[in-house]
Amino acid sequence: MVGVIDNYAGPVEAFLFTGTRVMRLPPLRSGESVSASDINDSGTVVGWATTIRHEPGMPYGLSACLWVAGHAYDLNDLASRDDGWFLTHAAAINNLGQILQLWDLTSTTDEGLFLGDSDNVSLSTLLLRVGDELDTDGDGDADYVLSDFNASSTVTHPLVLGDDGWVYLDVDLTTIGTTTVNQAIIGINTIPEPAALSLLGAAGLLLLRRRRGA
């Protein structure tokens, strides 16, 4: 089990509960806050950190991180992409070593969800991007536009990655042709049969629930 400790008097700390004791996970750099999002059966932990790095185009001051055997690694130091994406959140990890990641360009409107192996995140595949049109009923026509990934909380776990290739995530969807925003949990099959494709231009998608909002 992993989570965060917020003492309101300093940086947020990440922890790992072993079943018998709580272990604090180190930050990437001294003075930075860190948040642990997920752990697999091998004990590899993923999450994110606030960062004092100042690079051109870096959004938010966040950087995805990985903890192996108690050591923290900045995933942006392990990634090399020339398309402008910067890795801000490592949201989930499965027992195959695959990491579900959020990358940003310059703002939340440029956010993308990627899936890739922990040993080479540079080759991660884009699954969804804010602005993508989704077909949730399988008729070939777009029903919603992806408005936002609800993945900023340090308490809830809005992104889940299974060993079977399914991804579940909490998102905001805007109904096509309206301004109505719906909060939903969707499932994406990252290794679907060709006939099962229902996300326009990408992987299979299942709308699990929807709540109408303003």
Image: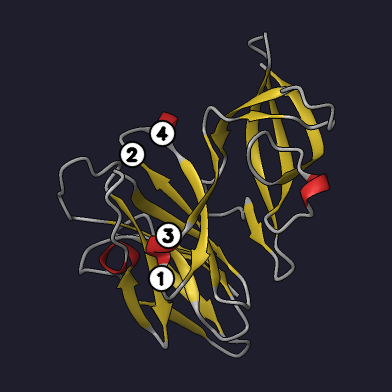
Residue 46 locus on image (x, y percent):
47, 68
Residue 72 falls in image quadrant:
bottom left
Residue 54 locus on image (x, y percent):
15, 49
Residue 60 falls in image quadrant:
top left
Residue 136 locus on image (x, y percent):
79, 32
Q: Is residue 24 above or below residue 214?
A: below
Q: Look at 34% across and 46% down and name the residue there.
A: 85
Left or right of residue 7: residue 10: left
- Earlier in the chain: of badge 2 and badge 4, it is 2
Amino acid type at circle 1 is Asn
Closer to the observer: label 3 or label 2?
A: 2
Left or right of residue 121: residue 105: left
Q: CA distance from mark 2 to mark 1?
A: 20 Å
Q: Secondary structure at mark 3?
A: loop
The residue labelled by disc 4 is 110
Q: Is residue 11 above or below residue 43?
A: above
Q: CA distance from mark 3 to mark 4?
A: 29 Å
Q: Secondary structure at mark 1?
A: loop
Numbered circle sitting on residue 120: 1
Q: CA distance from mark 1 to mark 3?
A: 31 Å
Q: Residues within 10 Å of mark 4 (few under 14, many from 20)?
A: some
Q: CA distance from mark 2 to mark 4?
A: 5 Å
The residue labelled by disc 3 is 6
Amino acid type at circle 3 is Asp
Closer to the observer: label 2 or label 1?
A: 1
